[in-house]
Amino acid sequence: MPKNLVIVESPAKAKTIKKYLGSSFEVLASYGHVRDLLPKEGAVDVNHQFAMQYELIEKNEKHVAAIVKAMKKADALYLATDPDREGEAISWHVYTILKDQEILKKKPVHRVVFHEITRTAVQAAIDHPREISMELVNAQQARRALDYLVGFNLSPLLWRKIRRGLSAGRVQSPALRMIVEREEEIEKFVAQEYWDVIAETEAENQPFTARLTVYAGVKQEQFSITTKEEAEKTRKNLLKAANGKLRVTKVEKKQRKRNPIAPFITSTLQQEAARKLGFTAQRTMRTAQQLYEGIDIGGGAVGLISYMRTDSVNLAAEAIAEIRQLIAERYGKENVPDEPRVYKTKAKNAQEAHEAIRPTSVMRIPETIKEALSPEQYKLYDLIWKRTVASQMIHATIDTVAVDLQCGKDNYFRANGSVITDPGFIRVYQEDVDDAKSSLDDERMLPPLEEGQEVDLNALQCNQHFTEPPPRYSEATLIKALEEYGIGRPSTYASIIYTLQHRKYAELEQKRFHPTDVGRIVNKFLTLYFTRYVDYGFTAQLEDELDEISRGEKEWIPLLNDFWKPFKHQCDDILESVTRKDVTQEALNENCPECSKPLAVRLGKHNRFIGCTGYPDCKYTRSMDEDKSTAAANAEIVEGRVCPKCNGQLQIKIGRYGKFIGCSSYPDCKFIESLQKPHDTGVDCPECHQGKILKRKSRHGKIFYSCGRYPDCKYALWNEPVAEACPLCAWPLLSKKITKKRGTELVCPKTPCKFSKQIDEKSE
């Protein structure tokens, strides 16, 4: 008969822990949080020390009932939820429910914490319990109260001033501001032209290239040559000066060392999984949770990684010893540094007792447990394993060479090259980078060159370039920016990104964030009227103060008081002084072509558009993408055709998704037709065998392929079809799929066939 009751968050975690404890322990799951604030105004009582009114979460009532029933029979309670604020809060809520129902009486209550789910860690935690940390609980309550107060006061304002159904969050709003500001930077960006001059030369039958660095005694900067005429003139002068030869004037050789980077924390894991694996932040955390809670790799479930919500780069001494042993056995003793590598945590409030994300045992080599893991579990575990091992290996040694080549008098080219002489940690792992620029100075070999040597100049190339705007945020770069500004914490990055997309404030297109029109308006409203609360510095400072509460350095009620009073005053003032028109309309320096009243940018049901301020008397509108010179296209007549429904005049119009053909009798006649005719690929439809597959564009601009007999035949696919039967399943066509990781390949679009074959497009 179990005498001890252990509470964890999830059934998977409960199953893993149960096998490490004896028959005297019963392990139950709370299934996450068991209580939350009442979903109504007043759940945080601002007039009575911010008293918080909680209720049981309906879907978890049966799990709470099971805990209550089991506790009646148990002699002691062990709260083994996650080692962070949320985990501490769940333990406190479970304890409070049992206490309020007078079930605990004098039974002992223990809080146990472990950072990996292994037999050693779990049993050590059971042997060394502590009390519930009210500092961590209060920090979580303060965070929850702030989010509630912001949501329940800002959201009604957004409903009244912009549109019903909108909402705003304390942390999501600065993140939205980042995305919108980046988009505005891109829109304002003016590209600048510049040219470079590249020498194509060779020595010892090995070709290489060099860039012009000094011309006529003047060092060449990015904008030294800005026109084609200047570039061509420079090229001709250099060719004349060179007379077919360049002379080596300087050869500079260096050896540099590249050190490995720290093991993963939450943010870097999310960034690298996005870069290398194409995982979203949510997918990364969901998969990491599975690896942490335990997977049966033979002999029962075992936790494969340490706790994945952390901002510490520390590694336990035992873990480092095991890693060094593995490196020596697998890669050779020469790849083990003399002393273990120690990394410094950058986060202000990193809990140094926590560890970085690492395998619970590096001796579980990814390949040996691959069969027990799902594909995404294996990919993420492999990434974590490699990063952890590499972090304790020796540096990489790289030989670099820089060569200056003279071209006549006072003209110089430079060639750079490098070679990895000892890969060190690169044998195992190398970090990807965001938005990497291609360069002639990429690592490559140069031929052996000596000062005074002459080399053949084969050609001079003038290359045109244009400056580029800053790239839009990807998930990886947005998380990196949030971390750098101190906005949010490890457990919040994934939810921030999810919320922005769920509220339709931002959309991911080609893995880059684009603000929606609604997102722009919401951001405009918040930055204009709640500047302080979307300020990056203010948000980061508030996060730091919440961290101070968790360390017991600050009280949570005064913090809420300091936030609430000015925030509430601001809300009340905006409610009275700002109209919907102030927020949703933006005046243009242009008059309506129909009634001469001013035009304004307005927010419609889905997007922004340009409309007359004389509405509803004047109903003139046009697309945001349409400028004044093309406005007349709204009335452009389609010659030689009439509406097939009512014989009215057909016109070229502009709607939300661009130009289309429509009837002039609209709204009485709603006939429309695409202006762009689908392209015939010439491939027969494999489903109906009657139509051809056509290349089409969706209303959002995405290319897809579908049967020309639609809607009678609804066969469609995203990738370009190829008239070639699948050699495995004999499906009449294959499709051409292009990915960053695998390049171009032919794949079978028929489920569940998994045929794929890589192809080289250059040879086609």
Image: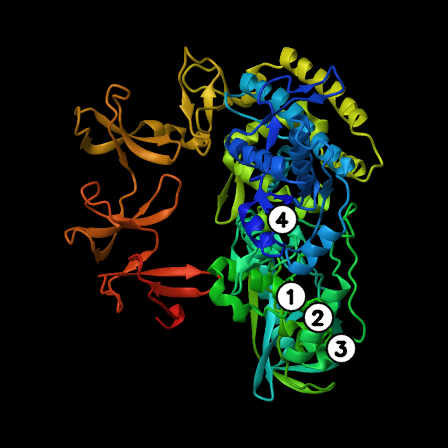
Dot 4 amino acid type: Phe
Q: Quadrant of the C terminus?
A: bottom left
Query: Relative to residue 177, is residue 266 depicted above or below?
Result: below
Tell whether label 3 touches label 2 (CB within 8 Å). no
- Give the left or right position of residue 266, taking residue 617 as reference: right
Q: What residue sits right under mark 3 in the picture?
A: 255
Q: Residue at x 74, y 14 (%)?
A: 47
> Cα distance, mark 2 to mark 3?
31 Å
Which numbered tag is attached to residue 25? Answer: 4
* Mark 4 residue element: strand
Q: What residue sits right under mark 2 in the picture?
A: 322
Q: Mark 4 or mark 3: which comes first in sequence?
A: 4
* Mark 2 residue element: helix
Which of the two residues, 735 or 419, is positioned nearer the viewer here?
735
Tell whether label 1 touches label 4 (CB within 8 Å). no
Query: Relative to residue 413, is residue 353 depicted above or below?
Result: above
Q: Residues within 10 Å of mark 4 (few under 14, many from 20)?
A: many
**Marks 4 and 1: which is nearer the front?**
4
Q: What residue sits right under mark 1 in the picture?
A: 361
| Picture mark count | 4
Dot 1 amino acid type: Ser
